């Protein structure tokens, strides 16, 4: 079974179990999540949002463990999920320092406006924490109640903190494979040289 079909089946199972806060389908995020999770090694922690946490099934995590995102799934290195992305970023830095291994932290692009995320970027650089911050950039519909979130360019802000930025567009039939290859490469860079930022644009 392919990774995308595995995610789709797991999403259906999770929706039937009544997940908290409510079902959050991946939609176009599926290839990105598949590539992010499989691009990291199984001993690396994943710090994912409420929507992306379903990706833990690709590590063998039972769907039942994902009903309450606040519980996490320690045997599968899935950190408890919080709806506050800045806090997730700080947790990722702590996990990287505590484990000595690279950590992947998935964030929405609007999270760059969070003060805690700036603290996390700064702390990661100062300590050399091997965190791969992935900012998922997705076009929102016109009726989405989200105003302007950032008074600047994401890459410039990352550079100001000393975090190298890469970018990738997640589209096409080979999207999951390209994301996986990119994450694998950045994981290696982070393990040797500290935090990295991947700007991942979705269709």
Image: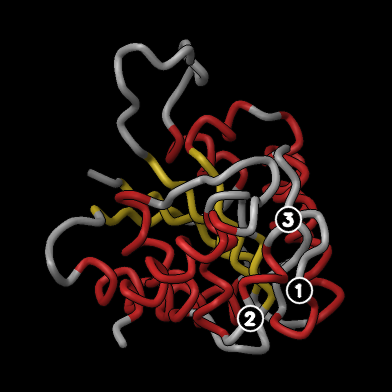
Tell me the quadrant of the picture where the N terminus can be found: bottom left
Query: Cβ–Cβ below 8 Å for labels 1 and 3?
Result: no
Query: Cβ–Cβ below 8 Å for labels 2 and 1?
Result: yes
Q: Secondary structure at mark 1?
A: loop
Sort mark 2 into few (<14), some (14-19) or many (20+) by Cα contacts within 10 Å.
some
Q: What residue did someone put label 1 on?
A: 73
Q: How is the image coloured?
A: secondary structure
Give how far apart the Cα atoms at labels 3 and 2 are.
Answer: 13 Å
> What's the mark number on residue 69?
3
Q: Is residue 34 left or right of residue 91?
A: left
- The residue depicted at 75 percent of the width and 56 percent of the height is 68
Q: Position of residue 157 (x, y in %)?
A: 53, 35
**Mark 3 vs 2, N-terminal side:** 2
- The residue depicted at 30 percent of the width and 50 percent of the height is 28
Tell me the quadrant of the picture where the C terminus can be found: top left
- Is 117 rendered above or below residue 30? above
Q: Secondary structure at mark 3?
A: loop
Give how far apart the Cα atoms at labels 1 and 3 are.
Answer: 9 Å
Q: Of residues 62 and 26, which is closer to you in this image?
A: 62
Q: Position of residue 152 (x, y in %)?
A: 46, 22
Give how far apart the Cα atoms at labels 2 and 1 are.
Answer: 7 Å
Q: Position of residue 89 (x, y in %)?
A: 70, 50
Q: Secondary structure at mark 2?
A: loop
Q: Of residues 68 and 99, which is closer to you in this image?
A: 68
| Farthest residue, direction right | 98
Q: Position of residue 46 (x, y in %)?
A: 64, 69
Q: What residue did someone put label 2 on?
A: 61
């Amino acid at each position: 079974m392919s990774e995308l079909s595995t995610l789709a089946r797991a999403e259906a199972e999770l929706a039937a179990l009544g997940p908290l806060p409510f079902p959050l389908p991946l939609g176009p995020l599926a290839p990105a999540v598949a590539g992010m999770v499989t691009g990291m090694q199984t001993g690396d922690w994943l710090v994912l949002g409420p929507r992306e946490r379903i990706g833990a099934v690709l590590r063998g995590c039972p769907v039942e463990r994902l009903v309450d995102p606040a519980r996490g799934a320690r045997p599968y290195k899935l950190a408890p999920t919080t709806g506050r992305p800045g806090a997730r970023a700080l947790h990722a830095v702590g996990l990287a320092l505590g484990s000595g291994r690279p950590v992947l932290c998935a964030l929405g692009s609007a999270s760059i406006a969070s003060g805690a995320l700036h603290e996390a970027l700064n702390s990661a650089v100062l300590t050399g924490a091997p965190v791969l911050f992935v900012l998922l950039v997705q076009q929102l519909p016109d009726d989405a109640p989200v105003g302007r979130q950032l008074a600047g360019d994401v890459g410039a802000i990352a550079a100001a903190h000393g975090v190298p930025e890469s970018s990738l567009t997640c589209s096409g039939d080979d999207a999951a494979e390209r994301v996986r290859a990119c994450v694998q490469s950045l994981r290696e860079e982070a393990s040797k040289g500290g935090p990295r930022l991947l700007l991942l644009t979705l269709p």
